[in-house]
Amino acid sequence: MLAQYVANFPIAIPFENQKDKMIELVKDVLDNQSNISEERIDELTFELYGLSMDEIDFLNGEH
């Protein structure tokens, strides 16, 4: 991938508690194939990036 496409891509830095929760959820998905954990990962990611409901709806294909 060319650097020009990712140079301005925002990288969110999670707080320690957010990072710990994300790790816990990812492990649950890998170990148990948990759909609930996958949904919670999405929610935490949206929160981490500060997305609005309109942006979340767009990403979920609900535009």
Image (spheres, grey):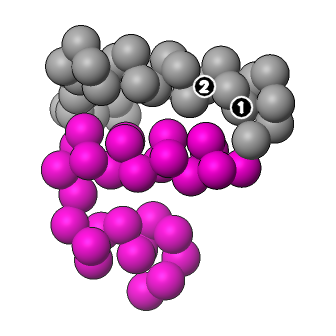
* Residue 3 visible at all: no
Residue at 25%, 39% in the rendered image:
48
Q: Main secondary structure of the magenta part?
A: helix
Residue shown at 39%/15% (left/top)? 20
Residue type, numbered disc 1:
Val
> Marks 2 and 1, Cα distance to the nearest angstrom?
5 Å
Q: Which residues are magenta?
A: 35-63
Number of the label disc, if any, that sits on residue 26:
2
Determine the image quadrant of residue 52. bottom left
The mark found on residue 29 in the picture is 1
Image coordinates for residue 46, horizontal then vertical, percent:
33, 50
Question: Image check: 58 left or right of 51?
Answer: right
Which residue shows up at 60% across the image and 25% down it?
26
Is residue 23 part of the magenta span, yes or no?
Answer: no
Badge 1 marks a residue whose secondary structure is: helix
Q: Is residue 49 magenta?
A: yes
